[in-house]
């Protein structure tokens, strides 16, 4: 049974913002939910988007890296704006006030050496944000939620990753001026440990030194 994109990814977050201290009444709590691009959008080659490291990781070895061999090809189908509208309408009926979402780096910049934003990707996120705005919901937008474009899969191992991310971040802020709350990198330690040291997340590396290199570059990208 499908409960909607915001439940089938990581579910409702009941502590998005808590105002007024431990004794505040229920009206002082602002409710929010959260999703990420790879977990929810689907259609990984639509609108000019190219694969990310998570697309490659989930398909590698006939899907053996994922316990149930699932992938993000369909996900919650939020690449279809109709589904996004339907899900957000459910949230509006529940009086949800905040939505955390992420932008797919490879939907904005599909190719490593191309720094002209993909118009289809920009338009898609403009519409996504517009749906929230029309329902008086506040977006909290994550710039990087683990889905490094496959064409840039090694950038975090070098200075290039720092430069690429800073440039990407500045472009996002310019493209989407209505967004007031930005999150730069989702759970950087998880990327380091599970993606580069333990190999259980994309890109599937098992090298502790690389994990520390990537972590250092995450920090330096906030200079």
Image (tube, grey):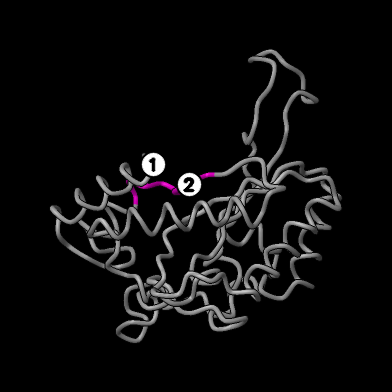
Label 1 and label 2: CA atoms lie apart by 9 Å
99 is higher (above) or lower (below) than 198: above
Decide which of 218, 79 is in the foreground and name it: 218
**Rendered location of residue 51, percent (x, y):** 45, 78
Q: Image quarter for residue 131?
A: bottom right
x 56%, y 69%: residue: 117
Q: Secondary structure at mark 1?
A: loop
Q: Which residue is mark 1?
A: 222
**Rendered location of residue 28, percent (x, y):** 76, 23
- 138 sits left or right of 222 in the view: right
Magenta stretch bounds: 183-190
Q: Which mark is drawn over residue 184?
A: 2
The numbered mark, 1 or 2, whose residue comes first in the sequence reads: 2
Q: Image quarter for residue 1?
A: bottom right
Q: Quadrant of the C terminus?
A: top left
Q: Residue furthest bottom?
A: 62
Decide which of 7, 209 is in the foreground and name it: 209
- 111 sits left or right of 5 in the view: left
Asked if the magenta segment contains residue 132, the reply would be no
Tell me, yes or no, whether the two marked residues, 1 and 2, touch with CB atoms within 8 Å: yes
Residue neighbourhood size for the residue with mark 1, other residues' Cα within 10 Å, grouped as few (<14), some (14–19), many (≥20): few
**Rendered location of residue 97, percent (x, y):** 76, 41
Decide which of 180, 32 is in the foreground and name it: 180
Foreground tag (1 vs 2): 1
189 is higher (above) or lower (below) than 151: above
x 49%, y 65%: residue: 105
Residue neighbourhood size for the residue with mark 2, other residues' Cα within 10 Å, grouped as few (<14), some (14–19), many (≥20): some
Asked if the magenta segment contains residue 189, the reply would be yes
**Rendered location of residue 209, percent (x, y):** 13, 53
Q: Secondary structure at mark 2?
A: strand
């Amino acid at each position: 049974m499908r409960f909607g994109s915001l439940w089938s990814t990581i579910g409702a977050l009941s502590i998005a913002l808590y105002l007024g201290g431990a004794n505040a009444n229920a009206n002082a709590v602002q409710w929010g939910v959260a999703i990420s691009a790879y977990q929810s959008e689907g259609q990984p080659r639509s609108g000019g988007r190219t694969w990310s490291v998570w697309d490659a990781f989930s398909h590698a070895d006939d899907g053996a890296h994922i316990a149930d061999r699932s992938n993000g090809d369909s996900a919650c189908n939020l690449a279809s704006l109709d589904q996004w509208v339907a899900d957000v309408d459910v949230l509006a009926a529940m009086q949800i006030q905040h939505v955390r979402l992420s932008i797919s780096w490879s939907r904005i910049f599909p190719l490593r050496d191309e720094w002209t934003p993909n118009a289809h990707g920009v338009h898609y996120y403009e519409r996504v944000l517009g749906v929230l705005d029309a329902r008086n919901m506040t977006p909290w937008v994550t710039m990087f939620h683990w889905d490094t474009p496959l064409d840039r899969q090694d950038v975090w191992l070098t200075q290039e990753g720092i430069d690429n991310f800073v440039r990407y971040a500045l472009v996002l802020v310019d493209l989407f001026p209505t967004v007031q709350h930005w999150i730069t990198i989702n759970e950087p330690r998880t990327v380091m440990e599970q993606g580069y040291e333990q190999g259980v997340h994309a890109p599937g590396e098992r090298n502790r030194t690389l994990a520390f290199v990537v972590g250092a570059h995450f920090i330096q990208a906030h200079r």
